[in-house]
Amino acid sequence: MTDNENMDLTALEARVDELIHTVDELKSENSVLRNQQDSLVTERATLIEKTEQARTRIESMISRLRAMETRS
């Protein structure tokens, strides 16, 4: 092998190492983002449920107020 070929091979090895490192970082970041997404989906479902419960209670209060108004 010539010196030029050795330099090319060394540069290629360094680039492959960089790419492996980048892939590992992206896998880790992807995992974190998936966990955040799962958490946000769960939180959204909880908030939707709480909103629906509040809506039901408010509609019930409005109905009771109208009934009281009618009796008066």
Image (cartoon, grey):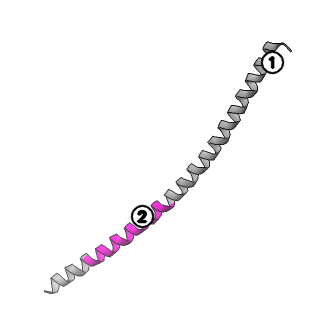
Q: Residue furthest bottom?
A: 71
What residue sits 66% from the left and 38% below the top?
A: 23
Q: Is residue 38 magenta?
A: no
Q: Residue furthest right?
A: 1
Q: Is residue 50 left or right of residue 2?
A: left
Q: Residues within 10 Å of mark 1 (few under 14, many from 20)?
A: few
Residue 55 x %, y %: 33, 70
Q: Is residue 52 magenta?
A: yes
Quadrant for the C terminus in the image = bottom left
Instruction: Name the dominant secondary structure of the magenta segment.
Output: helix
The residue beneath circle 1 is 6
The residue beneath circle 2 is 48
Say what secondary structure mark 1 lies in.
Answer: helix
Between residues 50 and 17, which one lies in front from this camera angle?
A: 17
User: Is residue 36 depicted above or below 3 in this figure?
Assistant: below
Bounds of the magenta segment: 42-61
Say what secondary structure mark 2 lies in.
Answer: helix
Give the CA distance from mark 1 to mark 2. Answer: 62 Å
Mark 1 vs mark 2: in front = 1
* Amino acid identity at mark 1: Asn
Disc 1 + disc 2, Cβ < 8 Å: no
